[in-house]
Structures are given as structure tokens and as C-alpha cells.
Image (cartoon, helix red, strand yellow):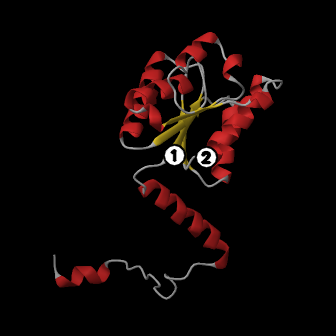
Amino acid sequence: MTENSNENQPSIMVPLDDLDKVPVDDIDKVDTLVQELATIRQSAKKIAIIGSRNLAITHQQIIETLTTSLVTQGNTIITSGGSSGTNAAAIRGAMKANPENLKVILPQTIGQQPSDVQDQLIGVPNIIEHPDRAMMTLTDASRICNREIITECQQLICFLSHTSGTLHQAVEFAEESHKVVTVFYLD
């Protein structure tokens, strides 16, 4: 190559005048981004794990392993009750690593849970019940429960299908609340 070959190359001019200025309309977006980056960098977080009840055993094993790893790193897991699926796998994983770093928020009461869920909750030190929701449908109580779980967390991990209406609403609520959100679609 000769020295003259650079002269025929197209050049791009990059203005440097306003790189350090943020438009007024974008200040909220920058604040949100700074908050999310700070959350990601924290060594120990409150992480909500919620999702579908209908999961293949391999997905349940992945969730259980992920939860065990997160708790081992010092994070606290917040989830709801469930005899199968995401919540059950999260409970098993957290119980393996450190039961003290698990918080289970039930949509209603322990007595309203199926017997296999009641059995799974034996030994969980931090369970929140809601007898005030005893007369609600499970769907309505679960919707409120998901919001409560998300309000308490800094990050949400959600396992769902594209047709999971209640879980999509939970993800939207988490995003509106400026939580760090990770969504795994299972279909």
C-alpha cells in the first residue's frame, strides 16, 4: 500500500461538540439505565423467580440449578408456592443452597394449597400468607401475588409461554417498575 491509498478512502466526520450533553427528554431514561446498571452490579440482590406451572422436567431442573447458583452467590430468591413448575423448582433450588435466602409469598393461605405444596413448604423459614385473599379466585389472588413479589425484588426472572396472560402482565408491571427483567419463553 502506498501513502496515497488513504486519500481515496471515504471519511466519516463525527461531531464531538455535544457528546457530553443529554437531552432533557432523555434524562429519565438515563436515570433508569443507571439504576438498572447499579442493580446488575450488586453482589447480592433480591431476585424474583416466577413462571408457568406446566414445565417439562428438564426445564424444572434448569430452574432448580439456576436458583441454587443464585442463592449460593448470596442472592435472595422470592417466589410463590407451587406443586410443579417454575415456583416449585425455585423453592427446591433455594432450599438446597440456603433456606434463609428464600422468601415464599403465597397468593392465599397454606391451608388453601394442595397437600403436595404444603409438604414442599415444610422447612421454608420465610412464608407470607394472605388470608385476606381466601375468597378470591386463584387467578386473581395470583395476579396480586405476582405484583407483590415484583415490588419486593430488584430483578425478575420469568419462565412463560407466549399465551401466559397473567405472566405477561407481571412482566409488564416489572418493566414499568424499572426492574431488571429476564424472560425465558418455553414454547
| Position above or below: 85 against 129 | above
In the image shown, does 134 or 10 lie closer to the viewer?
134
Say how many tags the image has: 2
Q: Is residue 88 left or right of residue 173?
A: left
| Position above or below: 167 against 120 | below
Residue 99 visible in image: yes
In the image shown, does 129 or 161 lie closer to the viewer?
129
Residue, x 57% and y 69% (percent of image)?
Answer: 30
The residue that disc 2 covers is 152
- Find the distance from the CA under tag 1 to the CA under tag 2: 7 Å
Q: How many C-alpha atoms fall within 10 Å of the one at disc 2: few (<14), some, or many (≥20)?
A: few
Asked whether the residues under the numbered discs 1 and 2 touch, taking CB atoms below 8 Å apart as contact, a structural biologist would say yes
> Which type of secondary structure does the marked residue at label 1 adopt?
strand
> Which type of secondary structure does the marked residue at label 2 adopt?
helix
Residue farthest to the left, as pictured: 1
Residue, x 76% and y 26% (percent of image)?
Answer: 139
Name which quarter of the figure residue 135 lies in.
top right
* Amino acid identity at mark 2: Glu
Residue 187 visible in image: no
Residue farthest to the top, as pictured: 115
The residue that disc 1 covers is 46
Residue, x 16% and y 80% (percent of image)?
Answer: 2
Residue, x 39% and y 44% (percent of image)?
Answer: 74
Q: Is residue 47 left or right of residue 72?
A: right
- Name the image quarter holding the N terminus: bottom left
User: Residue 142: where, in percent of width, then height?
Assistant: 71, 30
- Name the image quarter holding the C terminus: top right
* Amino acid identity at mark 1: Lys
User: Residue 42: where, in percent of width, then height?
Assistant: 43, 55
